[in-house]
Image (tube, grey):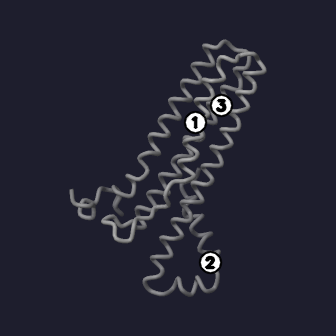
Amino acid sequence: MDEYLTEELLAKAREQMDAVEKTVYGVPGIKGYKEKELRREVDKTVRDMLARQLADQRARLTNLQVDLVVGGQLSLVDDLERSGIKLQTLTDRIRTASYGYAPLFDDVRVKEAELDALAKFDLDMFAGVERIKTMLDNMSTLAGRPEAEWMESIRALNATLDDLNTEFGHRNEVILNVTPTGGTDLAESPAA
C-alpha cells in the first residue's frame, strides 16, 4: 500500500463533507475536532481494507485445505487449520481495533500526530498481507508434494501470523509513545 493513501483518503473525506459540515469546519476550534474525526474515519477505512484483504487470504487458505482433502493428505488439514485460526484472529483484531479515541477525562489525549502514526501503523500491516499472499502462492504449488515440504511452508506461515499478531498487539503503544517529532513525549505521559 502506498504511504500517501492516508492523505488521499483524508482529502476525499474532506471533499465529501456536505455544505453544513464545510461551514462548521471553518469555525475556530471545530476544524481541529473535525480533522481528528476525519483521521479516525480514514483509519477505520484503512483497517476495513486490510481486514478484507486478510479475509481473501483466509478464503485461499480454506481452498488449500480442500485441495489437501481431495489429494488425500488429510494429516495436513489440521495443521493448516491452525494457520486459518491465526489468520482469522488477526483479521478480527484489525477489524475491531479502536479508532484512536481516548476517554474525555483520561490523562492521555489523542492528537493528530498520534492518529497519523496509528494510520501509518495500520498501513504498514499491508506488507504483512503481501507476505501471507506470497506464502499461500507458494503453497498452492505444493499439491501432491511430500508432507515435509508442506510442513515447512505451514510452519513459516504460522510464524509469520504469530509475528503479525504480536506486532498488531503493540498498536495501542503508538498512541502512548508518539509525538509530532516522532519521539516519546514524557511530559504528556501519565505520571508513573
Q: Which mark is residue 131?
A: 1
Quarter of the rendering containing residue 131: top right
For the C terminus, the quadrant is bottom left
Q: Which mark is residue 2?
A: none
Element assignment for label 2? loop
**Circles 2, 1 touching at the beta carbon (< 8 Å):** no
Q: Position of residue 146 (x, y in %)?
A: 66, 12
Farthest residue to the left: give it. 192
Quarter of the rendering containing residue 70: top right
Q: Judge whether 152 appears above or below 83 on screen.
A: above
Q: Amino acid at mark 1?
A: Arg
Q: Amino acid at mark 2?
A: Met
Using the image as rendered, state which of residue 12 and residue 104 is in the foreground: 104
Instruction: Give the spatial CA distance, label 2 vs label 1.
Output: 36 Å
Q: Amino acid at mark 3?
A: Leu
Q: Position of residue 57 (x, y in %)?
A: 66, 39
Dot 1 or dot 3: first in sequence order is 1
Report the residue at 62% width, 29% height from top: 81
Dot 2 or dot 1: first in sequence order is 2
In the picture, measured across the screen, residue 168 lies left or right of residue 149, that is left
Farthest residue to the right: give it. 70
Instruction: Give the spatial CA distance, label 1 vs label 3.
Output: 9 Å
Q: Judge whether 128 appears above or below 41 on screen.
A: above
Q: Position of residue 54 (x, y in %)?
A: 62, 43
Report the residue at 54% width, 70% height from top: 38
Instruction: Give the spatial CA distance, label 3 vs label 2.
Output: 40 Å
Report the residue at 61% width, 30% height from top: 135
Residue on which the image places disc 2 = 17
Residue on which the image places disc 3 = 136
Dot 3 or dot 2: first in sequence order is 2
